[in-house]
Image (cartoon, rainbow, N blue to C red):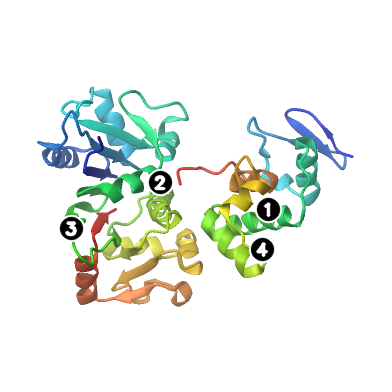
Amino acid sequence: MPTEGKSHLVVAGKRIELGPDGHLLDPGDWSAAVAAAMAHRDDVELDAAHWWLIRFVRQHSIEYGMPPLMRVVIQAMRREGVLEDPSSRILYRLFPDGPIREACRYGGLPRPEACI
Amino acid sequence: MTSDYIALIRSKPCSTSNRALLAALAGIGTRDAPATLFFQGDGCEMAHALAGGGLGPIDGDRFETCVCATSWARRYGAASPPAPLRAESLVFFFQRLALARRVDAFGLGGWCCCLAPDASAANRSTRLLLEVASAPADERQRRETLEVALGAAALELEAGVLFRGAGLDHLADAGARGWRQITDFGLLDILAQDGGGRIAPDFGVVAVDACRVGRLRAAAATILLL
């Protein structure tokens, strides 16, 4: 079981530092266990759709240098049959505080610059 | 009341661009319908410079002066810009753009002006053409140009991005990876004039010649020179 503080988590014996906005200070610290520990701290249960979104946002950020547009996520979800009839409303049910931003946080990415 | 005029300002402050901006704004905007000025990218530096001088002839009665929140934060931090400047999003810009009858764009590569066709005209085009004609000076400039296109894509506007001249540098080398999401996911049309061998063949960019560029411009309701 991970231990936690406001500014850090301890996962598998390693101290993971968090910034003031809850994002990892060092993206290299990310692992699925770290994401699960963050979700546990937030009292969020990550299901298959959450994990798909986290991994998609991570992969998109690696490939294109930035997180995807919501439109892109919905398009990819439809293509891969992740959820029945995906939409921005469904994505907000997954992460009510902002699906892309929260997927970035659980995915170990910096807080997205959100002018779009 | 919302004005039917909007200007996108992306050029850095300098005597030439300042003069061009102020000349274009002469006689535009009224107390009842203030014109919208949206400063994005390096344009935020012009907004900052103008605000530092009290905005001079850009008075708060005739103009609402908005800065792109992200571009501003990159340069001056997360605090709100000084009044009368207001932080807004690219979504705000494109929503205002859709209502405008006259659109001026003060881009890094020059200036252009568009008068929208009469809203009641049959077969009125809503197509937006973004033209990129100058090379990115740095990664920030490259990203902020891309962000304008992504703003249009996020709103699913009928739009294309035309790269020409030095603007083709945006699509060259590893720095082009951000633009690839647009073709990979079919978000907007990406067109390149005389790209030659500078663009990777798997990019999904449509090569166009001068005749096609002329037709694209003629078909566009609005052209923004970025």
Question: Between B146 and A103, which is closer to the camera in this rendering?
Answer: A103
| SS at mark 4 in the image | loop
| SS at mark 2 in the image | helix
Task: Choose mark 1 or mark 2, whichever is in front.
Answer: 2
Question: Between A87 and A24, which is closer to the camera in this rendering?
Answer: A87
Question: Between B62 and B72, which is closer to the camera in this rendering?
Answer: B62
Q: Amino acid at mark 4?
A: Glu
Whole-angstrom CA distance, mark 4 to mark 3, is 41 Å
The subunit letter for the residue under badge 2 reads B
Marks 3 and 1 in Cβ contact (< 8 Å): no
Q: Which residue is mark 3?
A: B117
Marks 3 and 2 in Cβ contact (< 8 Å): no
Q: Which residue is mark 4?
A: A84
Task: Choose mark 2 or mark 4, whichever is in front.
Answer: 4
Q: Are marks 2 and 4 on the same chain?
A: no
| SS at mark 1 in the image | helix
From this view, report whether residue B37 is shown above or below residue B143: above
Identify the residue at image location x=59%, y=48%.
Answer: A100
Identify the residue at image location x=58%, y=55%.
Answer: A61
Mark 4 crowdedness (10 Å alpha carbons): few <14, some 14-19, many ≥20: few
Whole-angstrom CA distance, mark 1 to mark 2, is 25 Å
The subunit letter for the residue under badge 3 reads B
Numbered label attached to residue B91: 2
Task: Choose mark 3 or mark 2, whichever is in front.
Answer: 3
Q: Are marks 1 and 4 on the same chain?
A: yes
Whole-angstrom CA distance, mark 3 to mark 1, is 44 Å
Q: Are marks 3 and 2 on the same chain?
A: yes
The subunit letter for the residue under badge 1 reads A
Q: Amino acid at mark 1?
A: Ile
N-term mark: 3 or 2: 2
